[in-house]
Amino acid sequence: MAQPQDRKLSSNFKWQAILDKIKALDEAPINVFSSQREADRALSIYNRAIEHIHTDNEDIAMIALEKVVATYPLFTEAALLYGLCLAEARKYKEAELQFEKALLSDPDREQEGVLEHLLAQARLCKERSEEFERSRRRNEKKLLPIRANLAQAGILERAAGSIDGDDVRMASAKERDELMRQINRGESSSSIAPERRDGSGIIQIISIVVIVAVLVFSLLYFLIVPAVSRAKERDARLDWLEEQIEERAGSDDAFQGIWEDYLENFPD
């Protein structure tokens, strides 16, 4: 098993250097597997994982090692190798867990010393990483109001090609001078905004008027006009019927009675 040359803890620990020194196993460890077939299979997966690591295919190696350590928890070498891969990927919390599991697998004295050192190193890297992240968030929080003020003043703008808007650049001297001239003339963006809002308000009013006009036209066209047409048609029919009754009243007593009743109920 490869051992760190320097047992001192470092926040800039070279995990890859340890990985590069790990060699393939010639035979499977004793008293770990229930059968020779399992031992051969686990040994083959372990050695192929080392090949993947040495050919920059750590992702494939980690997938294989994850299954091996889950199936054979006493396979100390596999847990150690998996922990190193996790640490190299900056997954220090998961690496710490693997080193702890490896220490519980009854390693020999040499392995135990290496694992204890790697466990302490993983914890240190985890603490430094968490501290760095907390510091970054604090600084980001402090910068938020400053960025907001600068953005409102037009001093900062999105960098060209920025997708999420996090990248910003300082405005050029020409842009800053132009901004100051606008402020001095009273033509800053704060005075331009109401004009834009007024223009937008006029457009909204015109839109509402157009919509109301369309509704009124639709009401006239689809409801009132057909009703008037039907009324005219009904009047025409009544005029025709009145003429027919009046003509036949002179020669037919039945029509004469109807005509008299009509004149009595609907006098001109």
Image (tube, rainbow, N blue to C red):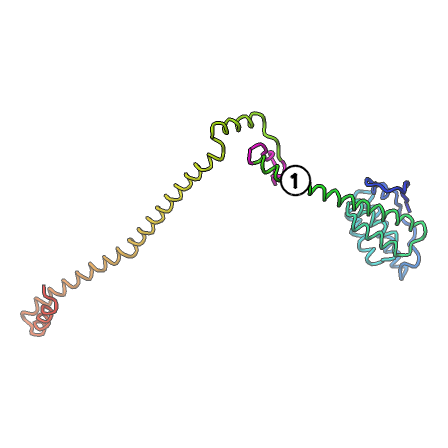
112 in relation to 151, above or below? below
Q: What stretch is highlighted in magenta?
A: 152-167
Judging from the image, what secondary structure is the residue with disc 1 in?
helix
**CA neighbours of label 1 inside 10 A, class few (<14), some (14 to 19), many (20+):** few
Q: Where is residue 66 in the image (x, y as percent from the top left)?
A: 80, 53
State the residue at coordinates (29%, 57%).
223
Q: In this view, does 22 lie to the left or right of 136?
A: right
Give the residue pinned by disc 1. 142
Q: How many labels does the image show?
A: 1
State the residue at coordinates (61%, 37%).
147
Q: Could you tell me which quadrant the C terminus lies in?
A: bottom left
Q: In this view, does 110 lie to the left or right of 56?
A: right
Q: Position of residue 14 (x, y in %)?
A: 83, 40
Q: Is residue 163 visible?
A: no
Q: Is residue 195 left or right of residue 67?
A: left
* 7 inside magenta stretch: no
Residue in the foreground of this view, choosing between 84 and 72:
84
State the residue at coordinates (49%, 34%).
189
267 in relation to 79, above or below? below
Dividing the picture into quadrants, the one containing residue 37 is: bottom right
Q: Position of residue 241 (x, y in %)?
A: 14, 65
* 156 inside magenta stretch: yes
Residue in the foreground of this view, choosing between 177 and 88:
177
20 in relation to 63, above or below? above
Q: Can residue 6 be seen in this view?
A: yes
Q: Where is residue 41 in the image (x, y as percent from the top left)?
A: 86, 56
- Secondary structure that dominates the magenta span: loop
Name the amino acid type tagged 1.
Lys
Q: In this view, does 170 lie to the left or right of 130?
A: left
Q: Which residue lies furthest to the right in this view?
A: 109
